[in-house]
Image (cartoon, rainbow, N blue to C red):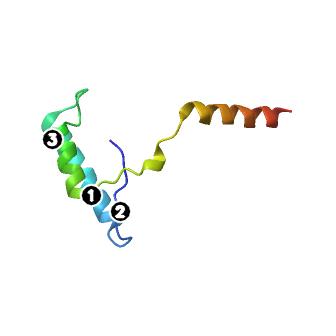
């Protein structure tokens, strides 16, 4: 699970600690599994913390790697 939780700078550390506790408590309650976190937990988490998944974090991996190779080829010359 990944995303961005927006917070005012004065509340950021408090919110960070709260999120860590929620994740830890869920881990202690349910243990670790390949299905973790559960869909139920994710929906509640997303709702509670207004998790935002920006679309710009997704990219075309093939194009990215091709451009990186081109860049490295230019640097090697």
* Dot 3 alpha-carbon crowd within 10 angstroms: few under 14, some 14 to 19, many 20 or more: few
Report, in whole angstroms, how far the alpha carbon at label 2 lies from the one at label 1. 8 Å
Looking at the rendered image, the quarter that the N terminus falls into is top left
> What kind of element bears circle 2?
loop
Seen as rendered, the residue at the extreme left is 29
- How far apart are the two marked residues, 1 and 3, measured between alpha carbons? 15 Å
Q: Which mark is residue 6?
A: 2
| Disc with the residue nearer the chain's start (2 vs 1) | 2
**Measured from the top left, where is residue 62 in percent x and y?**
58, 30
Q: Nearer the viewer, residue 29 or 56?
A: 56
Residue 40 — which label?
A: 3
Q: Position of residue 11 (x, y in %)?
A: 32, 69
Mark 1 lies on residue = 50
- In screen coordinates, is 48 left or right of 73? left
Quadrant for residue 66, please give it. top right
Q: Position of residue 26 (x, y in %)?
A: 17, 42
Pointer 2 with pointer 1, Cβ within 8 A? yes
Q: Which element is circle 3 on? A: helix
* Residue at left offset 23%, top offset 29%: 35
Q: Earlier in the sequence, mark 1 or mark 3?
A: 3
């Amino acid at each position: 699970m990944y995303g961005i939780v927006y917070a005012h700078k004065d509340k950021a550390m408090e919110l960070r600690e709260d999120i860590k506790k929620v994740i830890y408590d869920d881990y202690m309650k349910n243990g670790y599994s390949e299905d973790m976190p559960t869909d139920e937990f994710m929906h509640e988490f997303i709702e509670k913390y207004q998790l935002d998944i920006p679309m710009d974090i997704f990219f075309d991996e093939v194009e990215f790697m091709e451009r990186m190779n081109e860049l490295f080829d230019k640097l090697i010359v």
